[in-house]
Amino acid sequence: MDSQFSPVRRIDLKKVNVARSNTIRDINRQIVLNYVRELGPISRAEIARETALQRSTVSLIVDELSADGLIEEVSGESTGGRPPSLLSLRTADAVAIGVDLGIVKTVMATSDLAGRVLEQEEFPTDHDVNNALTKMVECAQRLIRKNGGTIEGIGISLPGVVDPETGNLYVPHFNWRNEPIAETLTRDTSLPVTVDNDANAAALAELWFGRPEIREVRDFILVLVEEGLGTGIVFDGQVYRGEGGSAGEFGHMTIGTGAPVACAVGSTECWEAFASERAALARYEKLSRSNGNNVVNFAKLVDQALKGERTARAALKETASYLGVGIANLIQGLAPQAVIVAGPIARAWPVIAEDLKASVDSSICRGFPSTPIISSTLGAQPTLMGALSLVLVSKFASKTIA
């Protein structure tokens, strides 16, 4: 699909990498690795045909990738003779630890190179940063010991602003500002650590590990609905972070007055206050006072709605309508190819999809092209997959001229 950017991109001379012969080799290596990742098991001949690289070049690259433990040879199905030799990602070992640092709980997991979760632990998130770091370090050390030195990095997704250049961060729910999270884990595990905003990380995971209908879209917005509300923006196949990592904070745009809850910074006028999990629960509690239903957590609210309970469905449908108002603003302002709704609310898609899309249609100006709005393809843990992706993507992404 054609890029929506101008065909001429200005080179940032402060960051430019001069193209040398080894740069071309590195790009070809990433191309071959990604063909194996997306289409494997695949033969050398198929890769050469798809990439127009010479067979000898493909064989040299395959030998390098095999020596580095990234791919392996597997036997294909025989058609009567000797089974063909095919290439697949090597997934025997855990290579990454992901830390999904949420407002209520922290989930930590290991994954193989393909992003398949192998082992998982969770514990309540301590709002004291030192206590939280102690728990994360202890869990990471356990996971590292269990895997005999195969772990290559740690990725952390968290509900706050992260500056990718400086590593400075701000988590408003805990009032954490520039805490040494990455530095502490690196010191205590001897592994590289990457930290990013949870919505950005989830968008990265959709881009690289989502279903094909998402991987083939290069401009999309991911709307992450949890205790708070944030967005991850992908332009031309890259997560857009903006100055200081603050892009995507659309959860705090004003869409009305008198929301059922306050947002993380105390406003009752912003999108998060109208369309977050907390907003849906507040609506449910208000509606339930007349019929005696018990207040539930968000997972139970979704369960009840899927079972057909009227009050639960009404609370989620009203929340979806406000979610649609914000999404309409994003579509009109950024014109993405798709909008993805992620977080636990995606499980309620059969209940909310119609109301959400109707709200978008009624809020958007006439003449705008229709934008697909779909639920996340990452299942119940998009931010955990995002944390793992912060490590895994470095294996597959090619660093070209800025």
Image (spheres, rainbow, N blue to C red):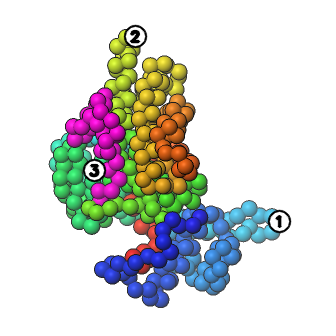
Residue 392 horizontal side relative to residue 145, left or right: right
Is residue 268 on the magenta stretch?
A: yes
Q: Is residue 3 magenta?
A: no
Q: Residue furthest bottom?
A: 21
Which of the two marks, 1 or 3, is nearer to us in this view? 3
| Viewer-closest of 232 and 44 | 232
Percent position of residue 138, x then y: 26, 50
Disc 1 residue type?
Gly
Task: Bin the neighbour count of mark 2 within 10 Å (Cα to Cα): few under 14, some 14-19, many 20 and up.
Answer: few
Residue at 65% from the left image edge and 80% from the top image edge? 52
Judging depth in this view, the residue of 323 and 333 nearest the camera is 333
Identify which residue is drawn at 49% across, 59% down.
219
Mark earlier in primary sequence (1, 3): 1
Q: Which residue lies under the disc numbered 3?
A: 160
Q: Which residue is mark 1?
A: 80
Residue linked to disc 2: 291
Badge 3 or badge 2: first in the primary sequence: 3
The boundaries of the magenta stretch are 245-272
Is residue 341 left or right of 290 when viewed as pictured?
right
Regarding residue 99, the answer to whether it shows in the image is no
Q: Is residue 19 visible?
A: yes
Give the dominant element type of the magenta stretch: helix, strand or loop: loop
